[in-house]
Amino acid sequence: MPELSFSEVIGNITQVEGRADIMRVGKTAAEALKIESAVSIGDIVRTKSDGKVEITFIDNTVMKVGPKSRLGIDEYLFKPEEGKRSASLTLYRGKTGFDIWKADFPAEGNKFEMKTRTAIAGVRGTSGLLFTGNIERVYVKEGKIEFSNPLGSVLVTSGMVGEIINGGTPVAKPFSASE
């Protein structure tokens, strides 16, 4: 099986609410999203103020992109017969929910990371929310995430939130009542 290229489908849009579009590699105009629109490596999914989108990837990972958000798909490789899953997504702005199953593959064949402007969330079979802005946060509903930047790293587990304020050192703390 060849490596996935920019044009190969690695997921589909499974829900769309409001206005949302996709910027495709090599295209100058955005394309309106609809259910069953294909998603490929290099695409950027964009939602407007009233938009929400759900993406289901080839490995059944689900990402729910919230309003006023941009999510880029930098890398997505899934070869279960070889024990490999490698994914890298970038949340340029806004928020995204995620439900990522824990792959039982060797460490060298398994990587799933979500990046923001100042952080990397290394996901290990997890569901939760990732926010980006002046304060970057990852909420973990189930599972665990290594939340890091060049200043440090914290392990965020169920019922916790990882936080980086203005590019500072990552911290992990329990959800507050207001969250």
Image (tube, rainbow, N blue to C red):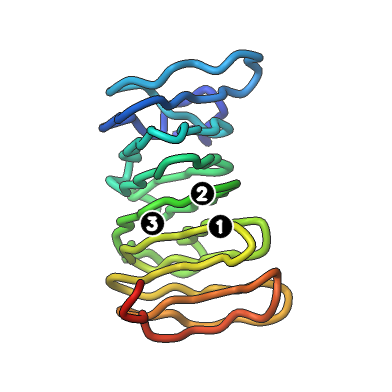
Disc 2 packing (10 Å; few <14; some 14–19; many ≥20): many
What is the three-letter code of the residue carrying label 1? Thr
- Residue toward you, 53 or 48: 48
Residue position for label 3: 83
Q: Is residue 38 above or below residue 87?
A: above
Residue 16 place in picture, x, y as percent: 30, 29
Circles 2 and 1: CB distance less than 8 Å?
yes
Q: Is residue 119 left or right of residue 86?
A: right
What is the three-letter code of the residue carrying label 3? Gly
Q: Quadrant of residue 17?
A: top left
Closer to the chain start, of discs 1 and 3, is 3
At x 36%, y 47%, the residue is: 63
Residue 36 place in picture, x, y as percent: 29, 22
CA distance for labels 3 and 2: 32 Å
Q: Is residue 149 above or below residue 57?
A: below
Circles 1 and 3: CB distance less than 8 Å?
no
Residue 50 place in picture, x, y as percent: 38, 33
Q: Is residue 102 above or below residue 23?
A: below
Residue position for label 2: 94
